[in-house]
Image (cartoon, grey):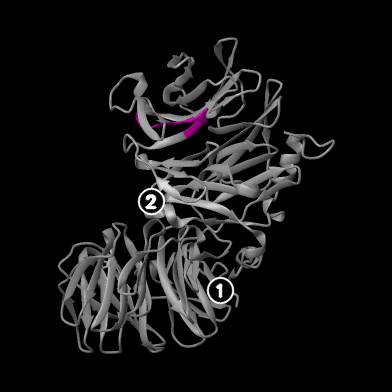
Amino acid sequence: MNAPATGTSRRRFLTRLFTDPDSNPAACELRPLEDLRQHTEGVLWAATDAGDAYYIAGDEGVVFRFDGEQWQREAFPSELPVHALCHRDDRVYSVGWLGQICERVEGAWRAVQGGENAAARVNLPLFDIEADSSGSLWAVGDQGRIVQFDDGHWHEHDSGTTANLRSVLPLPDGRVLAGGSAGTVLLLENGSWSLLETGTGCPITSMACLGEDTVIAAGGEYDIESGQFRGRLYLFSEGHWQSVESEHPLPRLRRVRRFDDTLLICGDNGTAFRWNTEGVKRLPCRLRYDLHDILPGTDGSVLLCGDGGTLVEETAASATDDRIEDRQQVRWRQISDGETNRTLRTLWPVDKDRLIAAGDGGAVLHIEGDRVCLDRTPQGLRIHDLWGSSPNNLFAACDNATILHYDGEQWTLAHRGDTDTALLAITGFGPHDIFAVGDNGYALRYDGLMWRQLETGIKQELYGLWGQDSQHLLAVGGGGIVLRFNGERWKAFNAGTDHDLYGVSASGLNKLFLCGLGGTMIRFEDNTWHRDFTGVRSDLHSAAYANGVFYATGSSGTILRNSGDQWELENAETDATLQAIEATSSGLYACGSGGVVLRRRN
């Protein structure tokens, strides 16, 4: 690979451009191909270009082939995860869990070895496979396992280590590198493997040649100070390893590949970079799934695969520039300033200009415009949800089956049950018709005189409530449970997921959204339940509808917006878990952990 700029070392070049990769964004966007998600929601770990077709593979023995016109799932010998793919001549090879090695010959896959739950070394997992210039194949895996395919046979090598290996790289001069856990890098030279001194304990997940004399290695390790995984890059040249320092934190990096004069890198949270003679450019991606492998597409574009059955492709800049720029803008700003460090779990608009946020330890914030004022309930109970019929008639669902009432000036006890069950959600249809639900399928109804317990027939937690009226009420909860109340009784059903559901919102009975664990979003429309693709793995804790737009918030500062037929990630510049979102006529607000309160710019 040619040096990116005359007189500039590769190391200095990378360091400078990775300082702020978003300062030089690519004129393109990575967007999902949702076809494959109809067939799998597992991780897609591997990709390869076999010349006449692309192959993508992953969990449960899923393998897809693209012949230039369409993607088709291929029959595979097992349901074991496939971790890596490689092609040689007219054959495609795979390696994966339990050391299973398979090959595609004359249009069909067949198992070669491994794949059994037995103690033999051939059943140790394999995680990478590559071909060298002579036609040999090299595969690496757990406990220092290295396997070579040559002269029609697979040979086990003695690597001299028990480190778990994750990457293998045949070099142009016939030597071979293998990298893995704790910064382990092995070199095959003159028929024997030796351990190289890398000076790092960072796991090496992928390597690629930059040229005849230089290798780039990628990986990631847990950073105690930030509490997150951080990506790392290293250069190997003339027998020495050097770290590529970056002032701008990188997410954990999963794969680095070289294609002609271009280096492609991908990693966690939808991260992807292209490096060529023009510089390093970050490829904008609305997804926040981890990306595990990368391929060059047509006309210089790229394809990437990753978690959740994700397959993304690069789109033309002319079609998406405005939308990319719009999504990169920071629409949300923090208006709280340390009023409380308690988690805020709920928001309620008391009128067109004011909201109340509440949460742990009885913390209550009064919000008007950008002004935030701290208040507390005398009971000091954790408040999970709020609902009110007017500014002086507000109810709070709390721990210990407790309901608090706010009359516009002070908080008082409205109801205390004979159980320690937490009430997690509350809604109503007037001052004399209010519902609350919580742990263990517990449910209450208020008729203006007293709170009565309702029998739901379930024991799962109920996290969210929404209703059009007291004859059309939905509660969502643990294990994907959905309860429907028809005015007299609750009936349980499943909307197509086993993931916990935390929030529910709707524009009416003909369009509802249920959100929950791991980016789960279920939509009801046209009398059918649909699984929506959100592009995030964050737990989604709340949903709201305002002015024709649906919103959802969740962990790691996730805010999603849907004004049409897809969910888009908004930039909030916070890592807080956002527990609630609500709108007034003067703005949209979100709140969450650490007492954070955000307001959206119009």
In magenta, the rendered stretch is 85-98
The label number, if any, that marks residue 599 in the structure image: 1
Query: Does label 1 or label 2 sit earlier along the sequence?
Result: 2
The residue at the point 76 percent across, 34 percent down is 2
Image quarter hosting the C terminus? bottom right
Question: Residue 270, relative to residue 220: is it above or below?
Answer: below
Question: Residue 22, relative to residue 352: is it above or below?
Answer: above
Q: Position of residue 354 (x, y in %)?
A: 49, 84
Drawn side of residue 493 relative to residue 246, left or right: left
According to the image, label 2 marks what residue? 41
Instruction: Say few, some or many: other residues with alpha carbon within 10 Å of mark 1 (under 14 / 14 to 19 / 20 or more).
Output: many
- Front residue of 420/559: it is 559
- Front residue of 272/317: it is 317
The residue at the point 26 percent across, 78 percent down is 473
Instruction: Say few, some or many: other residues with alpha carbon within 10 Å of mark 2 (under 14 / 14 to 19 / 20 or more).
Output: some
- Mark pair 1, 2: CA separation: 34 Å
Q: Position of residue 230 (x, y in %)?
A: 57, 43
